[in-house]
Amino acid sequence: MFDPSIGGGETTQNAVIFETNATGGGKLFARYKAGQRLPDVPEQVFQPTLIAPPIGQPTLPPPPPPPFGQPTLPPIVVTATPAFVELTVLNDFVNVRYGPGPEYAPPIGRLPRGTKVELLGANSTYTWFTFNFQGQLAWVTGDSRLVSIFGDVRILPIVPAPPTRTPAATATPTLSPFPDLVVVSAFLSQNPLFQGVPFSLTVTVRNQGGANAGPFAVAASFRNVYGAVNVPGLASQQQVTVVINYPGVPGPSGIFKDAVVLDLNNEVNEGPNGEANNLFEITYNVQ
């Protein structure tokens, strides 16, 4: 600021003497005010403060902001994908079959509740799966009501279904060239029998031979009370039911056994072995 009181055209009473170094930088040498030298000011050297990052944690620059208008995506969380597929039985049990379906019968085993097995393959619809069952390749259902499955079934290879087993042919029995009478069933109208009380016996007879039977009698006695009925004939592979009525049985009381007799008078030629099955034993109680 101009000070007119000094006079002589001077604008200030302060003077500074400094010298320059080789690079053009200035260094304060002396200061004067109104002809008097002022005390020297010690030179101050700037020392920057450095902050070192924590040991083992390198300092990385922050990521650049996304371009204007582009949404910021959430970080990707990577979860482990199991390298196998496991089935757990939820039901009391599930059947193990030799093919993918209930038509592969009968079952070859069972898996009880809580059993875990590693799946090895699947059918084309991923509804049935293969696994190692007692050393052989077997199949189990994937029904979610019966089992639960952990893992991605799509990583399993497709296994072709085996053919269903052809049922063994049932041998046709060779019929005897003679009639063959046999009792199919026989039962009393009441058991126990009461002394002096009427009752009946119902008998079903079948001709299992290869020839028709002529007339024959069906008979039985209970406590020496005899009863019989005549059958006019019975064709091959046919059966008939007859009823024999009794007036009652005498005492004493107890448990007894008697037999129903077919072809009582041996009127039907049943061949060399046909007569062996003409008796049918009945156990009854008398009170």
Image (cartoon, rainbow, N blue to C red):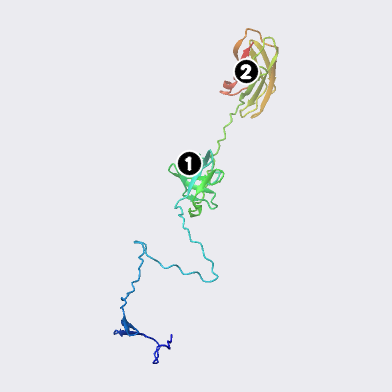
The amino acid type, in three-letter code, at marker 2 is Val
Q: Looking at this view, is 17 or 62 the one in front? A: 17
Residue depicted at 62% across the width and 13% down the height: 285
Along the viewing direction, whichever of 78 and 213 lies nearer the viewer: 78
Q: Is 276 on the left or on the right of 136, as rendered?
A: right
Q: Dot 1, how many residues are within 10 Å of its Cα: few (below 14), some (14-19), or many (20+)?
A: few
What amino acid does circle 1 point to?
Thr
The numbered disc on residue 261 is: 2
Up-down relation of residue 272 to residue 162 (above or below): above
Query: Is label 2 in a helix, a strand or a loop?
Result: strand
Question: What is the quadrant of residue 230 in the picture?
Answer: top right
Determine whether, in the image, residue 171 is placed left or right of residue 78: right
The image shows residue 248, relative to residue 163, as above or below, that is above
User: Between 41 and 83, which is closer to the camera in this rendering?
Assistant: 41
Which percent across, then down, holds residue 68?
A: 53, 71
Dividing the image into 4 quarters, which one contains the N terminus?
Answer: bottom left
Q: Which residue is mark 1?
A: 115
Residue at 48%, 41% (x, y): give it.
115
Q: Give the farthest residue toward the left.
A: 22
x%, y% of residue 202? 67, 20
| Nearest to viewer (mark 2 / mark 1) | 1
* Left or right, residue 41 beside residue 257: left
Query: Picture coordinates of residue 20 (x, y %)?
Result: 30, 85
Secondary element at tag 1: loop
Q: CA distance from mark 2 to mark 1?
A: 58 Å
Residue 93 visible at all: yes
Q: Residue visible at 50% across and 54% down?
A: 154
